[in-house]
Image: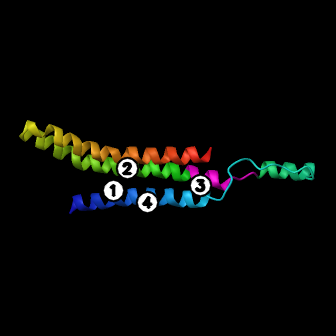
Amino acid sequence: MKTNARKLIASLFVVFALVCFGCFAASAEGTDTTAATTSTTQTAEEEAVSETNDHNTSLSIGLIAAALATGLAGIGGGIAVAAGAPAAIAANSENPKTFGKSLIFVALGESIALYGLVISIMILSKLV
C-alpha cells in the first residue's frame, strides 16, 4: 500500500509539472516578452510611472513554471529512486548478474528529474 501511494504521489508531481508547462506555453503564445517601447508623445511623468510599474506577468509566470517543473520533477525523481534503489541493491546482493537491469531501473527514476530540468530550460529559453 505504501509503495502504491508513493507511485501515485510521484506521478501526480510529474503531471502537475507538465500542466504548469502547458499553462505557461498557452499564456505565452500571444504575448511579447520584449520591453515595451515608449512613444514620443508620452510625458515625462507618464514615463516615470511606466518605468516604476513595469510588471511583466509573462516573465513571472514563466519563472514560476520553470521552478515548479524542476522542483516537482526532482521530488518525483527522488521518490522513484528511494523506492527503486533499495530493491536494486537487494536484487544485486542476491544475484550479481542482475546489476545491469537494476542499474537501468534506478536510472529511469533519475531521468524523471532530468526531464524536469530539460523542460525548465526550454521554458527559460522561451522567455529570453
Q: Position of residue 67 (x, y in %)?
A: 50, 49
From what the image shows, is residue 108 above or below residue 97? Answer: below
Kindly indicate whether the residue at mark 1 contacts the one at mark 3 (C-beta within 8 angstroms): no
| Region in magenta | 54-63
Helix, strand or loop at mark 1: helix
Amino acid type, callout 1:
Ala
For mark 1, what is the residue? 10
Could you tell me how far apart the alpha carbons at marks 2 and 3 are, in whole angstroms? 21 Å
Q: Which tag, 3 or 1, sits closer to the chain's start?
A: 1
Other-residue count near label 4 (Cα within 10 Å), few / some / many at <14 / 14–19 / ≥20: some
Could you tell me how far apart the alpha carbons at marks 3 and 4 are, in whole angstroms? 15 Å
The dot on residue 58 is none
Q: Which tag, 1 or 4, sits closer to the chain's start?
A: 1
For mark 2, what is the residue? 75
Q: What kind of secondary structure does the magenta stretch mostly adopt? A: helix
Q: Residue at x 21, y 40 (%)?
A: 103
For mark 4, what is the residue? 16
Magenta stretch contains residue 74? no
Could you tell me how far apart the alpha carbons at marks 2 and 1 are, in whole angstroms? 8 Å
Helix, strand or loop at mark 2: helix
* Of the pair 72 and 124, the residue shown nearer to us: 124
